[in-house]
Amino acid sequence: MQVRPIKTRVFKERENLAAFIREHIPNLKDGSVLVITSKIIGLAEGRTVADTGEKSKERTIKAESDSAVKTKYVWLTMKDGMLMANAGLDASNAGGKFILLPADSFVCARKARAILKKLYRVKKLGILITDSHTAPLRAGVTGVALGYAGFKGIRDYRNMPDLFGRKFKFSQANVADGLAASAVLVMGEGKERTPLAVIEDAPVAFTETVNRKELFIPLKDDMYLPFLSKLPKRKK
């Protein structure tokens, strides 16, 4: 698998996304996965709000999330079935604004795929929309898939035999987040100006339809919930 970050000029708010992509990626091989950071999609959709202070930020976070809890550093929020900081609000490289997440990343990925398949004249094309998230008890951020189109986001090993014939009961490979982590690693988090990446020879199963719920687990069924809820409070 090869992951190639694409350096671009600065994307402008409400600019045409497909034209921007074609400007910086003249050719795209059949069977590629195109990675797009959620920031430029939010900008393309005009999903920005002015940064006028903490009160305004708090109101926006609450409006953008399904639930929100104030923590030591951020608002820990639930949005679109995912835990994330501050409902995904991004103030970095935003010119005094907050950039919000796309209104619906799966819909956006599907629409972008339909347009770009025609522009590049390819049959197999994956679109992956990424963001950067933290993980409990781990330092730093990694890439995560907000939405995707054109490939299956999960590889299911359940009921398949292992090397010794024992069948897997729970094992599933998260393909979408794995690709996102690889792409965001080379795209960077600072002033690299690489909001796009092209993945070639990715180990994915291309498909015309995507189950947008395949990666999500209901909160009540999450395996970490009982442990985290019973952790003792740290002594000061």
Image (tube, helix red, strand yellow):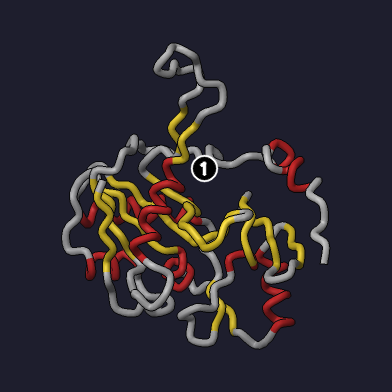
Q: Is residue 2 above or below residue 46?
A: above
Task: Tell me which residue sits at (48%, 58%) in the image.
Answer: 142
Mark 1 — residue?
A: 212
Image position, residue 55 (x, y; %): 74, 82
Q: Is residue 100 above or below residue 2?
A: below
Image position, residue 173 (x, y; %): 46, 35
Q: Quadrant of the C terminus?
A: bottom right
Q: Is residue 232 left or right of residue 64?
A: right
Q: Quadrant of the N terminus?
A: top left
Q: Is residue 195 visible?
A: yes
Three-letter code, disc 1: Arg
Q: Is residue 197 above or below residue 209?
A: below
Image position, residue 232 (x, y; %): 82, 51
Task: Tell me which residue sits at (68%, 86%) in the image.
Answer: 53
Task: Tell me which residue sits at (73%, 70%) in the image.
Answer: 72
Nearer to us in this view, 192 or 20: 192
